[in-house]
Amino acid sequence: MTQAISTLGLDFGTTNSVASLARPDGTTEAMMFSHDGETFAACRSVLCFWRDEDEAGAPRRMEIGPWAIDQFLELGGDCRFIQSFKTFAASPLFSSTTIHNKAWYFEDLLSAYLRRLSERSGAQWPAQVVMGRPVQFAGVQADEALAQTRYETALKRLGFETVHHVYEPVAAAYFYAQRLREPATIMVADFGGGTSDFSIIRFDPRGGKLRAEALSHSGIGIAGDAFDQRLIEHVVAPLFGKDSTFRSGDKTLPVQSSLYSRFAQWNQLSIMRYTKDYADLQKLLHVSDQPELIRAFIAFLDADASYLLYRAVAQVKMRLSREATARFKLEAGSLRLDREITRADFDGWIGADVCAIQSSVNEALSRASLSEAKIDRVFLTGGSSYVPALRESFEARFGTEKIETGDQFVSIAHGLALIAQEEDIEPWLARSR
């Protein structure tokens, strides 16, 4: 028998990424990172590119995660900030983006991010890696074969000799199944930033070896980022004049909704002050029926408070996971925003998203030819599994006693690393559909 070696599980996410090492004795350890006195396993999936001050010919500099955010906050429009780039992995419409007059392809961005992730972990990464992938990649016309090719190109640039791809919920299921003592049919629901993915797997741990049969998979491009957008749509944008009106001659017209389209990505908001939209807001201020709202929008842009906004939104969502009410507060420059939000309001805003997610659960059950009663356990993982309305939708459907959670941010990476040590890895691998 070939001697087991350390293997790496890599959970590259839309919002956060986690790397986990599995050792020959079957233990796993997430790679840890330290920033400003805080230690964490989940590193933000963002990059920041900049040049040294007043040196036009200086080489590019690049950072990831919270270090990239530090640079973005310090440099503002004098850097190139990239977030949620996993959403472009499967897009045939995305060719490249220009950074400091150079074309950067997706695999360039991913390899740069992962190389720095390895350096920041301070640990030696092994030559074998299992990479997680969603069941359903985000975006229209998503090409999963293209995404896997891009992943492999990026990983091989880092020196990985062996690269395998496993569905993220399958990895979470494998991690969860380590605790099983009897055969069970498990549904795993993985809620990331860009996608929600589901797998139904029948496990049998008897005889000292974990055997498994994958019964079905499904996925949908709705997850945590969509929930954030509902808060922005219903709380933030109206405080900045969305759905308000202005005067044009003897007519009353709605403020154009395109002024609020940049809220989809907060780094896009940071450059809005240098666009025609900013000039349009200045003109709108003089004819608006609610000029105080437009003035607040301008003050927000002048304060370059886009990151502060998205951090405030994330904090509100987190508090609403624990409490019935939460206050949304944003203070930057002359801007002061303060509004109380109830969980009931938030539940209503994300109601259609939760229904769409449950429709994807329907697909998984239908493909497995199973009813809810035939599912023994439901394992919820990923950051959005903390959202009460989402969890309650699973409790109502499967029964509270069947729902389990745990290690929401690292379970996939741990499962990937463990799968990499299987003598026969083939049954676990993702197949193009």
Image (tube, rainbow, N blue to C red):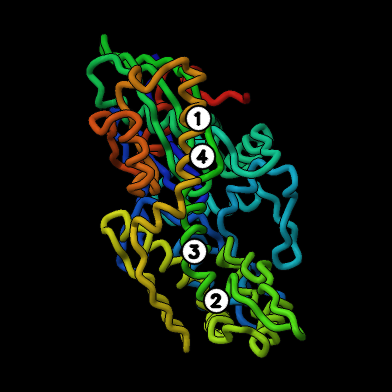
Residue 341 or residue 407, whichever sits in front:
341
Mark number displayed over residue 356: 4
Q: Tell me if label 3 and label 2 are in contact, CB under 8 Å.
A: no
What amino acid is at disc 3?
A: His
Q: Is residue 130 above or below residue 194?
A: above
Q: State the separation of the CA atoms marked 1 and 3.
A: 37 Å
Q: Is residue 95 left or right of residue 346?
A: right
Q: Is residue 364 above or below residue 383?
A: above
Q: Who comes first in sequence, dot 1 or dot 3?
A: 1
Q: Is residue 248 left or right of residue 413?
A: right
Determine the residue positioned at 42% across, 76% down. 330
| Residue that badge 3 annotates | 234
Q: State the separation of the CA atoms marked 2 and 1.
A: 43 Å
Residue 254 or residue 165, whichever sits in front:
254
Q: Who comes first in sequence, dot 4 or dot 2?
A: 2
Q: State the separation of the CA atoms marked 4 and 1.
A: 24 Å
Determine the residue positioned at 73% across, 61% down. 98
Residue 55 shows up from this direction: no
Q: Residue 323's quadrant in the figure? A: bottom left
Q: Tell me if label 4 and label 3 are in contact, CB under 8 Å.
A: no
Instruction: Say which element carries label 4.
Output: helix
Q: Who comes first in sequence, dot 4 or dot 3?
A: 3
Instruction: Say which element carries label 3.
Output: helix
Instruction: Say which element carries label 2.
Output: loop
Q: Who comes first in sequence, dot 2 or dot 1?
A: 1
Instruction: Say which element carries label 1.
Output: strand
Determine the residue positioned at 53% across, 63% down. 233
What amino acid is at disc 2?
A: Phe
What amino acid is at disc 1?
A: Val
Disc 1 crowd rating (10 Å Cα; few below 14, some 14-19, many 20+) is: many
| Residue that badge 1 annotates | 166
| Residue that badge 2 annotates | 240
